[in-house]
Amino acid sequence: DLSQTQVMGDLAELSNLTALELLRLPHTQVSGSLAAVSKLKDLQRLDLARTRVVGDVSLLNMTKLVDLSLAQSRVRGNFGVITRLPDLVKADLSGTAVSGDLGALEY
């Protein structure tokens, strides 16, 4: 957990940590694209709230993800992608450019 620290850098530097299950970098200077973390297939908790991270949420394909927070980041796309995340219990996309139709959430 490196939340609310002066940590900075590009998410791409973490893309080879494929066994990572928890990534919490909220309120940091971290930047980069969501594409970098899409390679982390074992990730269960991802918190990049209030970072400079950009990208389309459609890149999120971590099927083990339980908790997702991208609030106040620069992500965009259709939130219907969360229907492809079967274990997801919590998602916070507030303050982002994510959009979509609630009908996409019906199973």
Image (cartoon, rainbow, N blue to C red):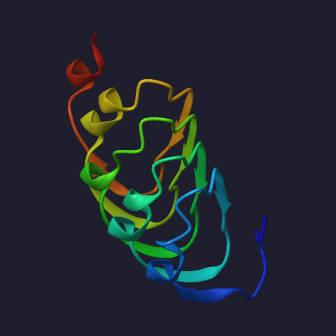
Quadrant, the C terminus: top left
Q: Residue at x 44, y 73 (%)?
A: 53
Q: Is 64 on the left or on the right of 25, as rendered?
A: left
Residue name at image x 26 percent, y 34 percent: 80
Q: Position of residue 16 (x, y in %)?
A: 49, 72
The image shows residue 61 at horizontal and vertical percentages of 34, 45
Q: Is residue 62 left or right of residue 35?
A: right
Of residues 71 and 56, the one drawn nearer to the viewer in this rendering: 56
For the point 47% across and 66% down, the residue is 73
- Pick the front one: 52 or 39: 39
Q: How many marks?
A: 0
In the displayed structure, 82 sits above or below 99; it is: above
Judged from this view, the residue extending furthest toward the top is: 107
Q: Is residue 78 left or right of residue 42?
A: left
57 shown above or below 67: below
In the displayed structure image, the side of residue 62 where residue 91 appears, left or right: right
- Residue 4 position in % (x across, y down): 77, 74
Q: Residue at x 55, y 73 (%)?
A: 51
- Image quadrant in which you'd find residue 17: bottom right
- Tell me the quadrant of the picture where the N terminus can be found: bottom right
Nearest the eye: 27 or 81: 81
Query: Measured along the vertical axis of the image, is residue 15 above or below residue 40?
Result: below
